[in-house]
Image (cartoon, rainbow, N blue to C red):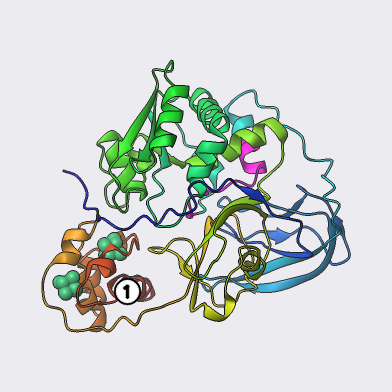
Amino acid sequence: MALNCIKIQHKKFTENCKTKRYPVPEKVSIPMSQHMGVPCEPLVSVGDEVKVGQRIGDSDAFMSTPVHSSVSGNVVEIENFLSSNGRVCKSIVIECDGKQTVSEDVKPPVITDKLSFINAVRESGCCGLGGAGFPTHIKLKYDENKTPVDSLVINAAECEPYITSDYREMMENPDDVLNGIKTIQNILNIEKVYICIEKNKPKAIELLNNMSLNDDAINIVKLSSLYPQGAEKVIAYNATGRTVREGELPLNQGVIVMNVSTVGFLNRYFKTGMPLTRRRITIDGDAVKSPCNVKVPIGTSVAELLRFADCEEDKVSKVLAGGLMMGMCIYDLNTPIVKTNNAILALKSDKKRIQTNCIRCGRCIKACPAGLMPTELEKAYNQRDAERLKLLRVNLCMNCGSCSYVCPAKRNLAETNQLAKIFVTDNN
Ligand code: SF4
Ligand code: SF4
């Protein structure tokens, strides 16, 4: 049985915008927490000189990944940074010298076996570039005797409106995408690969299909243009027909899901040794006069990017990091670009959502890919009933926003679920 998905407008206005290279900014602020897991500790101090690709933060914790400098210059401050998820971490402020001198440590890794491969992936600073930020080396470090994996699913759905950064990765760097996939497949001995692309990207489907015609292990899966095709459990099911059950990871079903930009980046790292220091960002929204895709040094401020894309600042009512459906509002435009960003949207009109009473139409239930009952979750949260929220499986909510999108009464269902999840955790 297919998982519920909804139709939304694509608004892929930047799909034909080739990636521009952003000039070196005057200053960057590089947070020590850009991934899921434990933040890094700074490895540099105020006054230190740093180079591009130099490791400037790391942690001994299992669930972490190092942070590298995206510029050359001098460390001028180590500040506290409040991220959009409410957590505070250290952030290294670097005044750029404009020379972009590359660190001597930047060398292609020597990969001979699985261990050296996993170590290289860790050293690259890579985390899931689709937005979740799960450290990539942890995802690939499974024990094949306990959890055999036979399927690698490449998430190239990019189902969020506006965002085209994964699409540009496929169109501009198809060799990196396919070679990255082959390296991962060969080292981990994975039998089948599914590259999953929504049908609204026919050129990418054709390109990757033609380039992989002679490889029987690679299957191009054409997904219907529906939301949220890119959600991990949804794409794992649509590619392999396997259901990732409550409490499970795709790994438990023999599946690894990786974002298409992640595999493209990894191939470039294997070739050059340059860690994750830049991100391709789609800048769009109705307040942006020159929508574009741009490769940006990590740590560049959102305000600078918006100026680069001729944003009409006086008309902006909301700026989102990420897409229209799952993006987070940015409260401070000095917020730096981090590894997990793929889009910045500046929107003019935040038409007032006037909530009315629930009319019991059931649309939110029909729309939910996790099979939840958002209207009941809302009631349980309003009654602060943690037991009922658990019974209704609020923990399975993937924050896709579909329920809020379809609700004719304009109930803030997805937002309520976020609060409900925190409430349940706090009352456990
Ligand atoms: S936000 Fe949560 S409850 Fe709403 S549709 Fe998505 S998964 Fe279901
Ligand atoms: S979609 Fe909105 S109005 Fe319809 S049942 Fe759900 S909460 Fe109620």
Is disc 1 surrounded by few (<14), some (14 to 19) or many (20+) residues within 10 Å?
many
Find the magenta span and give its range: 118-132
Q: Which amino acid does label 1 sit on?
A: Ala
Farthest top residue? 214
Residue 387 point in image, percent of width and height: 23, 73
In the image, is residue 133 above or below residue 381?
above
Local secondary structure at mark 1: helix
Residue with the mark numbered 1: 420
Residue 160 point in image, percent of width and height: 39, 55
Residue 26 point in image, percent of width and height: 79, 64
Q: Is residue 47 left or right of residue 1?
A: right
Q: Is residue 344 left or right of residue 241?
A: right
Q: In this view, does 178 lie to the left or right of 419?
A: right
In the image, is residue 368 above or below residue 200?
below
Q: In which quarter of the image is the N terminus?
A: top left
Q: Residue at x 82, y 44 (%)?
A: 102
Farthest left residue? 360
Residue 263 seen from this side: no
Q: Does the magenta stretch include residue 126?
A: yes
In the image, is residue 320 above or below residue 49?
below
Residue 402 seen from this side: yes
Q: Where does ligand 1 appear, by image quarter?
A: bottom left
Q: Is residue 5 magenta?
A: no
